[in-house]
Structure formats: structure tokens, C-alpha cells
Image (tube, rainbow, N blue to C red):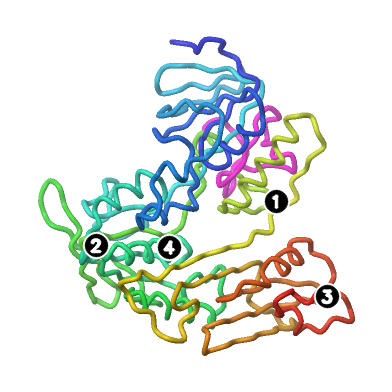
């Protein structure tokens, strides 16, 4: 067994994603172990790489040096060691799990452990580059999943000239963030880009060629209809990577359970990012991962930092390819669509809902007020008010009693 020279590090981080890179940039002397061969990168911008707008080096993140292409296979909690697949063993004083998440592979007929040719997850930079290499003008592409990732992938593929179909099982796109009306605006924008959108559409399986190396040819829907596909993108959500933690005997539910110091059931091990479950919530969001890393940096420095949870804002920009005319009345035309969503945009009984819509400009704003606080909202088109609204929501402060609720949707947020 080979042991790394100077084999005990003060802090060892398993995972070189956004959370691990952020922590390494804020804590001196961290040892980071990452499975990917690439330097840490901003995962939020993968769709921009797929569309050809950015090259991979543009989305690289500043971080400490990373041991790339190395996978941790076992954690020895008794001796505080991590064992790697290259035979090295690294001791730690504190260990941080930043193992992220894996894409969910849906239980589809024709989809086994080995993906058929033409079937792509969309989670890592390697996934993105493989997909970009496969796309060409006119290729038939089906994106399965209409959440934020699926919408971003469909837009990027359309910008590459592909004939794109987006299949969403739910009633409307981006159900976690949008209400039905704003999702309808998003759908119309995608359709103006040439994306064919199917909602309430359950995928049953894949039809692939026979032989030693099967390749996808169509996506089969539950109603028997087939969508021709040379490329299929799986954007069906993610699942926390908790295998190492489970094998080490840590408390794991949906994710690796952590307290307000991001500490696991082992006092010498912390967890941050997509793999961490805090107060019953696994966020799966870049903003939460970065906030957790910042708090943990303070904890490791001996401070009194505590993580209270994240109130995250979702932003999405869909630009219109110059070659594709955008219909009048579509949000953001002709330059594209700007969208912001935060909190809970689905009202409960007793909530106040304030909504402004401008069909001519394709602008739409709605906020939900619950009691004396802002519960959430969605903004399309002109996002001038989003900064003030988001700060009001994030601070969770009572709204002024004498303020007209309509002023929440003015350009300055009413303050």
C-alpha cells in the first residue's frame, strides 16, 4: 500500500465540484481529491458550453490544486484515512464530503447499465463535450425532462441547429419553480426557437438498433407514439452521491445528514453541496452549495458560523439564435428570455397574489404574499425589480404595513 508523502492533511475534501472548489479557495492547505480529469468548473454554465458560446476553460473555477482523476474508494473513520483507487492513502484531521450527485437514469425499457449510443446524461463537463461532439444541424434530439436542466439543454441543442423535442411528464415546464402561466410563456418561447414541447407525456422506453453496440433510434411514449431520435438527453433530475458515507456508517437519509456546522454523525467529517441533507432538505442547487462551503470555511477557521438554510433564486436566460425568428409577444423577444423565480410561487389558501402581465412585450410578474411576508414569485422579461424582491424574500422581513402590494411589482420593488 502506497501512502501519499506527508500523509496527514489538516483538511481533506472529497469532490472537486463547485462546493469543494469554493471551500478550497477559502481554507488554506486543503487537499482536494476529484474524480474528473478536468479542473473544477462552474456546472451552471454547461449549457453555454453545449451551445458553443463558451469553451471549457472559460467556466473553470479558481481553487487550490486538485488531485484529478482519483476516486476515493473507502473511508477509514477509526484511523482517519481515505483510501484511493490509485493505491494512495491520505490521513485527515477533518474530512469534507463534497461528492455531489448523480443524474437519475429513469427505468426505461431499453436503458440498461450501459447507455446505448446516442443516449447522454447531462451532468458533467465530459457529458457536455460528448453531447456537443454528437450534435450537428438537423439531427433529431429528444430531451427527457422539463426541469431547469432539460429546458437549458433543449435551448442549447436548438442553438446548435438540432431538431429538438422536449418531453415533460408533468403538467408544465419547470414545475418546481414556475406557475402555470409563467410556464406557458416559457413553453411559447421554446417553441419559437423551434423546440417541440410535449407536457403530460410519459416516456415508456427507447427503441434501439440490435447488435453488440445498440444505438437509439426512437423514444417510445406510454400512448404508443414514437419520437424519432438520433440523440436522447436524460435530464430527469439528480440523486445525492452517498455511497462512501453509507459504507463508512454515517447517518444517511436522502443525503448525508448534517447539523448547522455542516457536521455529519462523525464529529471529524463534514458534508456540503448536493450530497448534504440539512434539516431534512437536500437542495441540489449551486447557490446552496456555495453558501454551505462559505459557512464551513468559517467553522474550520474556528469561528461561530452556522448554516441556517438557503433561500435560493433561480435565474435563466434563453437567447434567441439569430437564424431563428422569434414570434412577437414572446417573452424577451427578440434578444431572448430572462426569467427569475424564487420561493414558493404557488399560492396557498389565504395568500395574496399580485400579478402583472404585458402581452405585447411578453412580460410577466407575479408575487405571493403570505401573511406579512413575501413567499415567492416569478418574473419574466424586464427583471429590474428582481434584486429588491429577492433581497426582501431572502431577508424574510415583514413587509411595511402601509405599503401597497401592487408596489412590489414596480421597477424599484416599492421601496
Q: Quadrant of residue 380?
A: bottom right
Q: Earlier in the sequence, mark 3 or mark 1?
A: 1
Tell me the SS state at disc 4: helix
Q: Nearer the viewer, mark 2 or mark 4?
A: 4
Between marks 2 and 3, how big is the CA–CA gap?
Answer: 50 Å
* Magenta span: 247-275
Q: What's the mark number on residue 152?
A: 4
Q: Residues within 10 Å of mark 2 (few under 14, many from 20)?
A: many
Mark whose residue sits in front, 3 or 4: 4
Query: Which residue is denoted by mark 3 in the rendering?
Result: 372
Up/down of 33 relative to 182, above or below: above
**Marks 2 and 4 close (CB-CB < 8 Å):** no
Q: Which one is in front in this view, the residue at disc 3 or the one at disc 1? A: 3
> SS of the residue at dot 2?
strand
Residue 393 image label:
none
Q: Percent x, y for residue 386?
A: 66, 69
Q: Secondary structure at mark 3?
A: loop
Q: What residue sits right under mark 2 in the picture?
A: 206
Residue at 61% of width from left, 46% of height from top? 289
Residue highlighted by disc 1: 279
Examine the structure image and report whether residue 270 is included in the region drawn in magenta: yes
Magenta residues, dominant SS class: loop
- The residue drawn where x is 50% and y is 69% is 174
Q: CA distance from mark 3 to mark 1?
A: 24 Å
Amino acid at each position: 500500500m502506497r501512502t501519499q508523502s506527508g500523509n496527514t492533511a489538516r483538511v481533506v475534501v472529497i469532490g472537486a465540484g463547485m462546493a469543494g472548489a469554493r471551500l478550497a479557495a477559502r481554507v488554506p492547505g486543503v487537499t482536494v481529491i476529484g474524480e474528473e480529469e478536468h479542473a473544477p468548473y462552474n456546472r451552471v454554465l454547461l449549457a453555454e458550453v453545449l451551445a458553443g458560446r463558451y469553451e471549457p476553460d472559460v467556466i473553470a473555477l479558481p481553487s487550490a490544486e486538485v488531485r484529478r482523476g482519483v476516486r476515493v474508494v473507502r473511508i477509514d473513520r477509526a484511523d482517519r484515512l481515505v483510501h484511493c483507487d490509485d493505491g494512495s492513502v491520505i490521513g485527515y484531521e477533518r474530512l469534507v464530503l463534497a461528492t455531489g450527485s448523480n443524474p437519475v437514469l429513469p427505468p426505461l425499457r431499453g436503458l440498461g447499465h450501459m447507455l446505448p449510443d446516442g443516449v447522454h446524461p447531462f451532468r458533467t463537463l465530459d457529458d457536455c463535450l460528448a453531447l456537443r461532439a454528437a450534435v450537428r444541424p438537423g439531427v433529431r434530439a429528444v430531451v427527457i425532462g422539463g426541469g431547469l436542466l432539460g429546458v437549458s439543454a433543449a435551448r442549447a441543442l436548438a442553438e446548435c441547429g438540432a431538431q429538438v423535442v422536449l418531453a415533460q411528464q408533468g403538467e408544465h415546464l419547470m414545475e418546481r419553480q414556475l406557475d402555470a402561466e409563467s410556464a406557458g410563456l416559457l413553453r411559447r418561447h421554446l417553441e419559437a426557437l423551434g423546440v417541440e414541447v410535449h407536457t403530460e407525456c410519459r416516456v415508456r422506453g427507447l427503441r434501439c438498433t440490435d447488435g453488440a453496440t445498440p444505438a437509439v433510434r426512437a423514444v417510445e411514449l406510454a400512448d404508443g407514439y414514437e419520437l424519432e431520435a438520433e440523440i436522447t438527453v436524460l435530464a430527469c433530475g439528480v440523486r445525492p452521491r452517498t455511497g462512501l458515507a453509507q459504507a463508512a456508517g454515517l447517518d444517511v437519509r436522502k443525503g448525508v445528514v448534517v447539523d448547522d456546522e455542516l457536521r455529519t454523525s462523525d464529529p471529524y467529517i463534514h458534508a456540503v453541496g448536493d450530497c448534504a441533507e440539512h434539516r431534512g432538505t437536500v437542495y441540489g442547487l449551486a447557490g446552496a452549495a456555495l453558501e454551505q462551503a462559505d459557512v464551513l470555511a468559517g467553522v474550520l477557521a474556528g469561528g461561530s458560523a452556522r448554516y441556517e438554510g438557503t433561500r435560493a433564486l433561480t435565474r435563466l436566460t434563453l437567447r434567441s439564435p439569430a437564424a431563428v425568428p422569434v414570434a412577437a409577444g414572446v417573452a424577451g423577444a427578440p434578444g431572448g428570455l430572462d426569467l427569475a423565480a424564487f420561493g414558493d410561487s404557488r399560492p396557498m389558501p389565504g395568500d395574496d397574489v399580485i400579478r402583472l402581465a404585458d402581452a405585447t412585450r411578453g412580460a410577466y410578474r407575479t408575487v405571493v404574499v403570505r401573511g406579512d411576508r413575501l413567499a415567492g414569485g416569478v418574473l419574466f422579461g424586464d427583471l429590474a425589480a428582481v434584486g429588491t424582491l429577492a433581497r426582501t424574500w431572502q431577508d424574510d422581513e415583514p413587509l411595511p404595513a402601509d405599503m401597497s402590494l401592487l408596489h412590489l411589482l414596480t421597477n424599484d420593488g416599492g421601496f
